[in-house]
């Protein structure tokens, strides 16, 4: 066999090899497009669909402004008796509860002046304190943070309060501080009126998380902090945190 024939044969082999490589590359690309990429796309669509199917948005209107929160679909609006305790003729309220009725999120907008009072002479202290790092910026003109606090109760026991609070003293407290340091927890905004005293320029907004099965009123204290701490560790409480931190003006 001549050198020319050998070269010609080698050239054919090289061409065949290149064609095989090109064919494999094309098949690989087709496989990626039709199987791998499609599977990733389907997975993304499925995740988005699942999130949409399990999340709902509840709204309330006040003075021509819409307020809303996002929440799991299985969290339902509180019954009429509960709503009545939060709402008045001049207020709008969203009150959502988990299935077990152990955790409640309340967003109340009104024209009522919300001015907490506190007697520092009682010598009561902050017994538990935690502030979340997530800034809530779409509900009021101020930056809000979720604060969970427990304070001594007059005569023994403890009181607890959890809610959105403007950046300030209430969001920079600590265990051992006077209980008045956290007196505004849950009051996201206080009503302001124009000079004529009639036109509302800013509503009061109360945004709180409550544990309905743990009695907590000015007259009734909780005996121990542990039941509240246990609730703070539950998944439903964590869901409530996400709900209240989603609160916003539309």
Image (cartoon, helix red, strand yellow):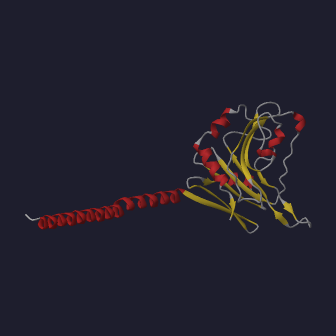
Q: Residue at x 82, y 31 (%)?
A: 155
Q: Residue pushed farthest bottom?
A: 64
Q: Position of residue 246 (x, y in %)?
A: 65, 56
Q: Nearer the viewer, residue 198 or 139?
A: 139
Q: Is residue 154 left or right of residue 247?
A: right
User: Furthest residue to the left?
Assistant: 1
Viewer-nearest residue: 137 or 222: 137
Q: Is residue 67 visible?
A: yes
In the visual, does 211 lie left or right of 32? right
* x and y percentages locating residue 131 in the rendered image: 71, 44
The quadrant holding residue 20 is bottom left
In this rendered view, identify the residue nearer to me: 163 or 13.
Answer: 13
Q: Is residue 25 left or right of residue 159?
A: left
Residue 235 vertical position relative to residue 71 in the rendered view, above or below: above
For the C terminus, the quadrant is: bottom right
Question: What is the quadrant of the N terminus in the image?
Answer: bottom left
Tell me if 187 is positioned left or right of 103 in this view.
Answer: right
Number of marks in picture: 0
- In the rendered view, would you say 188 is above or below 15? above
Which is more toward the observer, 63 or 46? 46
Please state the horizontal and vertical placement of residue 112, each as a whole percent of the image. 83, 57
Which x, y percent locates residue 34? Answer: 34, 63
List the single residue furthest toward the front. 3
154 versus 14 height, above or below: above
> Can residue 101 be seen at all in this image of the molecule?
no
């Amino acid at each position: 066999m001549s050198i020319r024939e050998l070269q010609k044969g080698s050239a054919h082999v090289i061409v065949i090899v290149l064609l095989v490589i090109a064919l494999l590359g094309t098949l690989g690309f087709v496989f990626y497009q039709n199987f791998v990429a499609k599977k990733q796309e389907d997975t993304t669509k499925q995740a988005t669909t699942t999130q949409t199917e399990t999340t709902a948005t509840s709204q309330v209107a006040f003075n021509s402004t819409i307020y809303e929160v996002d929440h799991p679909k299985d969290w339902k609006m509180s019954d009429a008796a509960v709503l009545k305790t939060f709402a008045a003729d001049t207020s709008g309220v969203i009150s959502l509860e988990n299935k077990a009725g152990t955790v409640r999120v309340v967003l109340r907008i009104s024209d009522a002046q919300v001015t907490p009072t506190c007697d520092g002479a009682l010598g009561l202290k902050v017994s538990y304190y935690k502030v979340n790092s997530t800034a809530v910026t779409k509900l009021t003109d101020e930056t809000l943070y979720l604060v969970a606090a427990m304070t001594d109760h007059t005569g023994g026991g403890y009181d607890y309060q959890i809610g959105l609070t403007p950046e300030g003293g209430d969001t920079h407290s600590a265990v051992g501080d006077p209980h008045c340091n956290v007196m505004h927890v849950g009051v996201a905004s206080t009503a302001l009126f124009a000079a004529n005293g009639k036109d509302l320029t800013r509503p009061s907004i109360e945004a709180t998380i409550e544990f309905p099965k743990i009695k907590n009123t000015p007259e009734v204290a909780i005996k121990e902090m542990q039941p509240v701490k246990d609730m703070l560790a539950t998944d439903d409480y964590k869901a409530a945190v996400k709900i209240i931190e989603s609160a916003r003006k539309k």
